[in-house]
Amino acid sequence: MSDTNVRRFQRDQDTESETQEEESDELVCPECGGKLATDTEHGETVCSECGLVIEEDNIDRGPEWRAFDAAEKDEKSRVGAPTTNMMHDKGLSTNIGWQDKDAYGNSLSSKQRQKMQRLRTWNERFRTRDSKERNLKQALGEIDRMASALGLPENVRETASVIYRRALDENLLPGRSIEGVATASLYAAARQAGTPRSLDEITSVSRVDKDEIARTYRYVVRELNLEIQPADPESYVPRFASDLDLSDEAERRARQLLKSAKEKGIHSGKSPVGLAAAAVYAASLLTNEKVTQSEVSEVANISEVTIRNRYHELLEADDGIAA
DNA sequence: ATGGTTTTTACTGCGTC
DNA sequence: GACGCGGTAAAAACCAT
């Protein structure tokens, strides 16, 4: 047992808390009146001003590897490996050494070596799986938060979770923030479900900025081969219409306008949101339900100028069809 | 990086209440 | 006079190359 490789770990957390306790006692150096500091590593109490050693051979506050009674056994603060926040599990999970040696340093038989190899494999698998679970948990929480802030229905959250899970499985996360990918997933899911939210709306509830969301979104879509067709202007109509308290008739007219615009190919290259907003505005005129341009621009987050430009085109196109 | 397209910003004039 | 609306020019944003 003498040559067993036992390492003593310095426990950072313990020494910190001990030091604080000592300082709070306000001990003062008898020589110069300076503050006393406890150096746990050397077991000394020294004056931080003049360096006078007040006390030597303190009790070792370092890790204690043996427990002599039940009380000490419960004193968890003095046992265990040091922890780190750099790893998701604080480095507390099991590690199987890579040397094929037993505790005495003897080599293992080939049968034992194979067994250890298998154990290492499985241990690693469970460990990374566990880390993914944590990752997922956090991401799903974020997705949920953002989805409810945007009033997105359950099925969109489901889709977003599925997309995120896939991204995780395909190892798309490294180099990207969880938050970013979660947001991108939600954005994609909303579009897929036919209840799109504009990038601006998404940005307003996310902790990530617009550029990163857009970048991550493109990346995720490409890597996962998600097929997402350009947002259909019509899918914005119901939301705008209800935000403005418009009648079903107006909503129908707006759809109608967009349809004829599509047939005429007016809509290519223009922002879908702008088209939808213009259609809603035009429809409100056609049905004599007063809504101002600024109100529409408000709910659609589009400029009035754009609405004006679009709705002229829409009316022209519709006249062409009707006539 | 660049150039072309679309959207936004800011401003002005006109008519109505 | 405030408001809604239309138009314009220049700036900004966006997108493909």
Image (cartoon, coloured by chain):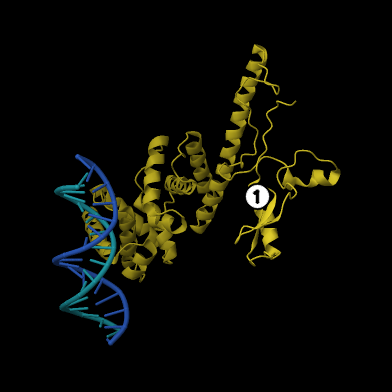
Chain colours: A yellow, B cyan, C blue
Q: Can residue A198 be seen in the rendering of this structure?
A: no
Instruction: Please indicate whether residue B9 sits to the left or right of residue A218 in the image.
Output: left
Q: Residue at x 81, y 40 (%)?
A: A67
Please give the residue where the numbered disc 1 appears in the rendered image.
A13
Q: Quadrant of residue A1?
A: top right
x, y percent for residue C17? 19, 40
Instruction: Please indicate whether residue A1 sits to the left or right of residue A108 in the image.
Output: right
Q: Where B9 falls versus A42 (above or below)?
A: below
Q: Residue at x 45, y 37 (%)?
A: A172
Q: How many marks?
A: 1
Q: Residue furthest right?
A: A69
Q: Quadrant of residue A245?
A: bottom left
Q: Quadrant of residue A28?
A: bottom right
Instruction: Please indicate whether residue A244 sits to the left or right of residue A76 in the image.
Output: left
Instruction: State the SS at label 1.
Output: helix
Decide which of A262, C15 is in the foreground and name it.
C15
For label 1, the crowd category at 10 Å Cα-Cα, with few meaning under 14, some 14 to 19 and many 20 or more, is few
Instruction: Please indicate whether residue C8 sits to the left or right of residue A106 in the image.
Output: left
Q: Where A33 falls versus A138 (above or below)?
A: below
Q: Residue at x 53, y 47 (%)?
A: A139
Q: Residue furthest front?
A: A31
Q: In which chain is the residue bearing label 1?
A: A
Q: Can residue A296 be seen in the rendering of this structure?
A: yes
Q: Where A200 falls versus A246 (above or below)?
A: above
x, y percent for residue A79? 73, 42
The quarter in which the C terminus of chain A is drawn is bottom left
x, y percent for residue A161? 52, 43
x, y percent for residue A102? 69, 21
Q: Where A207 falls versus A87 (above or below)?
A: below
Q: In the rendered structure, which amino acid carries the disc numbered 1?
A: Gln
Decide which of A291, A95 is in the foreground and name it.
A95
